[in-house]
Amino acid sequence: MSELAAIRRTYPPDAQVGVRIVDVPIALYTNEPRLLTSLRDYFAPYLVERPAWDAHRVFVMQGEPPYDAARLRDVSRAPGKSVKEAFYDTVDARIVVKRRTGVAIYVAEPDHYVVGDLVTNFNQAVNAVMMVFAKAMLQRSFVMLHASAVLAEAGGIAFASPSGSGKSTMALALVEYRYQFVTNDRLFVRCVNGYGAEMVGVPKRPRVNPGTLFWLPRLAPLATSEERSRYASLRAEELWTVEQKHDVDVDAIYGPGTVHLQGRLKGIYLLRWSPVDHGWNVRSLGAAERRAALDQMIKRVTVYDTVPPQAGESRAVNAVADAVSIYEVTGRADIGRLTDFVLTQAQ
């Protein structure tokens, strides 16, 4: 019996939830009442009465995942980065195992199974749903950028940077000024004739470190008294490196409707700054620079996608680069200064 067949036999679902994210229907199945409650809570704005007949199916199962540890091959990462995942292929699925938690994802197109201690590691169930959503968007000629984004009446603004460089903080800083929140870490973009660049966000709650909580007054209550005491003496550049993450329920804190997943993308800021650099500068990039910069922002589903990247990806990237303004921000990281700059530009 294959691993996938063993899951289907051992963990039959007894509850389902239907969601529609933008226009992507997803059916969620589970065998655990606590996970059912968590799924309904997390995806509350996107719930539908019943799953669509053509919905992508994700099985979120509490249990011990079956896999052959001896067959696992580590997914390579950049030098100095610890291995997060390992995988191997079977006749009916690709099996990806999270090294830290032991949660396993079974990619059996068009279905996906997530199995493990998901009550404890619920965020990995959410990540699996977002991965399925991402694959659906990529099939619709979107490209995926490593960026956060917000939306105002004049259009959307994205912030692109490596992890931990301030893109989530910048987005939430503008939400403090009544911008709508689009996405935290992944942004889908494509050009539409007569419209410009369309953007679509991922409905995942941003996960931020204590530095963001201490910078933004509306988020400060999320930090515990113990955390406030522990981090009070740290300098700003030290806070950037703290990996204690907090989920931010944007609609709950800033009000219903603050999250808005779709809009027209007007500009992108590349955060090429550092908390230890000096000076501060914002520079508009030329056409060739914009295309090269967008290429560096591209993210892919990688090990979870058994289909190679689209042949037309380069054309799609170039079209977006020609449709939006891209700015490079260098020097010392300064959330307040860039927030003021963006607000001034919008006037």
Image (cartoon, rainbow, N blue to C red):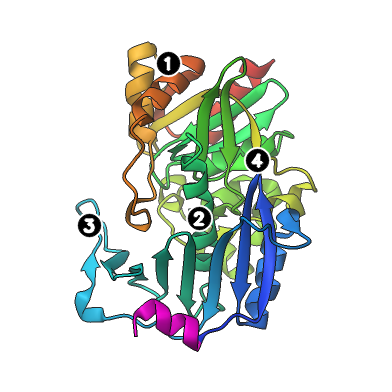
Q: Tell me where residue 115 appears, x and y as whole percent.
A: 47, 76
Q: Is residue 179 at all visible to an observer of this figure?
A: yes
Crowding at label 1, few (<14), some or many (≥20) Cα neighbours within 10 Å?
few
Instruction: Check residue 132 in the rendering and tell me which mark sits there, or answer none.
Output: 2
Q: Where is residue 177 in the image (x, y as percent from the top left)?
A: 72, 33
Within 10 Å of disc 2 (Cα), the crowding (few <14, some 14-19, many 20+) is many
**Which of pointers 3 and 1 lies earlier in the amino acid sequence?**
3
Look at mark 4 in the image and give the residue it sits on.
Answer: 261
In this figure, which residue is indicated by the disc labeled 3? Answer: 76
> Which residue appears at 26% of the width and 57% of the height?
81
Q: Which residue is drawn at 43% across and 60% down?
A: 109
Q: Tell me how far mark 3 sits from mark 4, CA to CA.
A: 32 Å
> In this rendering, which labeled residue sits more in front, label 2 or label 3?
2
Q: Where is residue 223 in the image (x, y as percent from the top left)?
A: 62, 62
Quadrant in which the N terminus is drawn:
bottom left
Instruction: Give the amino acid type for the residue marked by disc 4 in the picture.
Output: Leu
Disc ID at residue 283: 1
- Which of marks 4 and 3 precedes in the sequence? 3
The Cα atoms of the two marked residues, 4 and 1, are separated by: 28 Å
Tell me how far mark 2 sits from mark 1, CA to CA: 36 Å
**Dot 4 and dot 2 residues touching (CB under 8 Å):** no
332 or 180, which lies in front? 180
Does the magenta segment cover residue 73? Answer: no
**Above/below status of 320 relative to 42:** above
Of tags 4 and 2, which is closer to the observer? 2
In the rendered view, would you say 240 is above or below 171? below
Q: Which residue lies furthest to the front in this view?
A: 53
Magenta span dominant secondary structure: helix
Q: What element carries label 4?
A: loop
Q: Is mark 1 on a helix, strand or loop?
A: strand
